[in-house]
Image (cartoon, grey):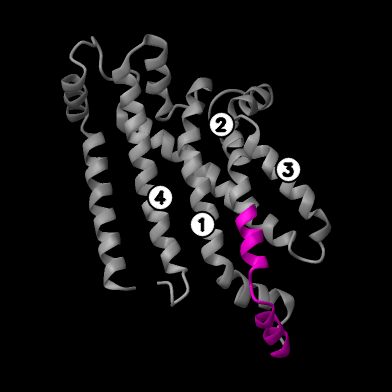
Amino acid sequence: MSGKQVTSWLILAILTAAFIIFIANSHWVEASLRFLFPQEEAVVLPRASLLEFFWQHVQLVAVSSGITIMIGIPLGIWVTRTSGRDFLPLVTDLTSFGQTFPPVAVLALVVPVLGFGFQPTVAALVLYGLLPVVRNTITGLKAVPWHYLDAARGMGMSRLEALFAIEIPLAAPVIMAGIRISVIVNIGTATIGAIIGAGGLGSPIIAGLIQDNLAFIIEGAVPAAILAILVDQFLANIERLFAYPAQA
C-alpha cells in the first residue's frame, strides 16, 4: 500500500469518526438545526435520536447489500460458464427490470407477503441493487484475456481453479466497481423504508414532508448524503487495492 493510499485511509477514518461523534451528540444536532431554522417549533424528530435513525439505515443497507453481493456475484459467474451461458439474456433482462421497477412499487407488492418494516424494505433494495453487481461481474469475467486461461489450462488447472486463481482476481476491480454503485444506490433508496415502518434516515424526511418541516427533512437527508460520500470513498479505497499494479 502506497503512502498516498495510507493517507486516504487515515483521512477517511478521521472524517468518519467526526461524523459519528457529531450525530451521536443530540444537543449539537438540535443546536445546528435550530440555528438554520429558527422559525420551526421542532427541529428534530422526537421519535428517536439521529444516531438511532442512522444505525437503522446502516442495518438496512448492510443487510440488503450483503444479500445482493451473495446473489449477484455467483449469478454473474454462473451465466459466464458453459452450464449457464444460455441463461445470460434472461438474467440480464430480469436484473435490468429490477433496476427500472420503482422501489415503492416493489414495497407495495411484497408488503402483503412479508408485512411491514425491515424485511420488505430489504427485499426491495436487493432487487434494486442486483443489476450493477451482476452486470459488472459478467463484464469483468468476459474481459479476462483468453491467453491467460489457455496458460492456466496448459499448467493443468481445472476450470474451477482457473476461476479462483486467474479470472476472479483479474475481474475484481470491475466487480468492485459494480458493488460500489449498488451500495451507494441502496443508501439513497433505503430512505423509502420509512414509508412502511422500517425506520432509518427516511423517517425524518417523510415526517418533514408530511408536516412541511424543512428541518426534519435536512435532519435525514444530510446524514444520508454524508454516509453515501463516506461509503463511496471507503469502497473506492478498496477498489484501488484490487487495481492492477500499473494502476495502483
View extreme (bottom): residue: 155
Relative image position of residue 238 (x, y in whole percent):
42, 62
Q: Please, is residue 66 above or below residue 125 in the view?
A: below
Give the residues drawn in magenta, as a range: 135-155
> In this view of the protein, can residue 48 be seen by the observer?
no
Q: Is residue 129 left or right of residue 78?
A: left
Q: Element type at marker 2?
A: helix
The structure residue drawn at horizontal position 46% and vertical position 39%, both measured from the top left corner, is: 187
Residue that badge 1 annotates: 177
Q: Earlier in the sequence, mark 1 or mark 3?
A: 3
> From mark 1 to mark 2, how far is it between C-alphas?
24 Å
> From mark 1 to mark 4, how far is it between C-alphas?
10 Å
User: Image quarter for residue 82?
Assistant: bottom right
Is there CB contact under 8 Å for labels 1 and 4?
no
The structure residue drawn at horizontal position 20% and vertical position 23%, both measured from the top left corner, is: 30
Residue 220, numbered circle: none
Relative image position of residue 139 (x, y in whole percent):
64, 61
Residue that badge 3 annotates: 94
